[in-house]
């Protein structure tokens, strides 16, 4: 099921798409019974900040740019803002700010470079990226292939009519850091399979290179199951964003936006919403520490 494409207020010509640039919004939650995952922006906090800085709702889609490499030419003047991973960005060669709206005039070119820390930069556009909806969302799900395809050289993106008013000229937010990251984790529904959550939080982990929007794989000392659970099988159960699953090799997987709707390995922990956002910005090789959350995840 797709929604119609609204009339374009302006357009963006894709002159370079980078390694992976996707159209994302808040996804399509509530469809797990149909086998459809939620998808949506991997770093929800950064995506929502972009919408707030443009004075518009989070119903409108933005671009999620993985590791820079994005070049756009405006056809009609467009107001934009960059959030999430911070990297060099210019309009017609002049640097533009971070978490601060700026105008890209008709014919001008925005270049988003590779970030020094974090991996996902959000390019939010006043009026939103106006591609047709699929099952109520404009997000691309890398696991199922639902939604608009990743950007390619030569694509033309429609921009919707502006909504709301610009109220803030800059947000004093801290971009993702390059050093060791700390993620807060609460006990999961199968935490007893691990015995003690400290087994998950005591080692220092490194982000495996096989990580993607489905999940972050952690590399480190293999964890063993609690007595009585070794060799046991578990029927498939529902999976949520932030679930910390313990596969057979004993190395945890942190599920992100494009996670499967079910899984057969025990979920021994669940990240807090803020830690899910931080996990979405982790770089392969980056050091990660898991810390017991002081309260259960709230979102």
Image: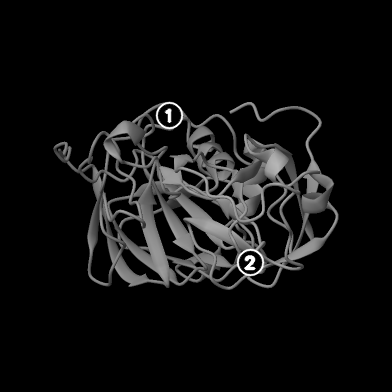
Q: What residue is drawn where x is 75% and y is 64%?
A: 205
Name the element at disc 2.
loop
Q: Are marks 2 and 1 in contact (CB under 8 Å)?
A: no
**Pointer 2: residues within 10 angstroms few (<14), some, or many (20+)?**
many
Depth check: give the residue in front, 164 or 234.
234
The residue that label 2 is drawn on is 283
Asked if residue 299 is positioned above or below residue 169 in the image, the reply reads above
Q: Foreground: 19 or 242?
A: 242
Relative side of 57 to 217, left or right: left
Q: Is residue 99 in view from this perspective?
A: no
Quarter of the image for the C terminus: give it.
top right
Location of the N terminus (image quadrant): top left
Tell me the distance, in whole angstroms, between the alpha carbons under discs 2 and 1: 29 Å
Write the residue at 64% across / 26% down: 298
Q: Which mark is residue 57?
A: 1
Whichever of labels 2 and 1 marks the residue nearer the N terminus, that label is 1
Q: On the picture, is 188 further left or further right than 12?
A: right
Measured from the top left, where is residue 155 in percent x and y? Answer: 23, 64
Q: Position of residue 253 (x, y in %)?
A: 60, 56
């Amino acid at each position: 099921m797709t929604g119609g494409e609204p009339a374009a207020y302006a357009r963006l010509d894709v002159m370079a798409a980078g390694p992976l640039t996707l159209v994302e919004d808040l996804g399509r939650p509530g469809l797990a019974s149909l086998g459809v995952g939620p998808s949506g922006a991997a770093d929800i906090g950064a995506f929502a900040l972009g919408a707030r800085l443009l004075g518009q709702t989070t119903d409108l889609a933005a671009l999620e740019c993985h590791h820079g490499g994005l070049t756009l030419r405006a056809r009609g003047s467009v107001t934009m803002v960059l959030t999430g991973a911070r990297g060099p960005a210019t309009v017609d060669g002049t640097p533009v700010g971070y978490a601060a709206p700026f105008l890209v005039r008709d014919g001008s070119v925005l270049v988003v470079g590779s970030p020094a820390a974090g991996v996902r930069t959000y390019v939010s556009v006043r009026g939103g990226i106006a591609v047709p909806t699929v099952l109520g969302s404009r997000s691309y799900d890398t696991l199922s292939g639902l939604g608009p395809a990743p950007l390619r050289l030569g694509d033309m993106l429609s921009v919707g009519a502006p909504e709301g008013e610009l109220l803030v000229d800059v947000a004093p937010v801290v971009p993702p850091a390059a050093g060791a990251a700390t993620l807060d984790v609460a006990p999961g529904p199968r935490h007893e399979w691990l015995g003690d959550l400290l087994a998950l939080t005591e080692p220092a982990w490194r982000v495996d290179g096989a990580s993607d929007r489905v999940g972050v794989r952690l590399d480190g000392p293999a964890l063993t199951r609690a007595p009585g659970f070794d060799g046991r099988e578990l029927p498939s159960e529902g999976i949520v964003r932030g679930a910390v699953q313990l596969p057979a090799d004993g190395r945890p997987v942190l599920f992100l936006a494009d996670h499967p709707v079910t899984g057969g390995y025990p979920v021994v922990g669940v990240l807090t919403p803020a830690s899910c956002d931080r996990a979405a910005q982790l770089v392969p090789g980056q050091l990660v520490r898991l810390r017991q959350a002081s309260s259960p995840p709230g979102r």
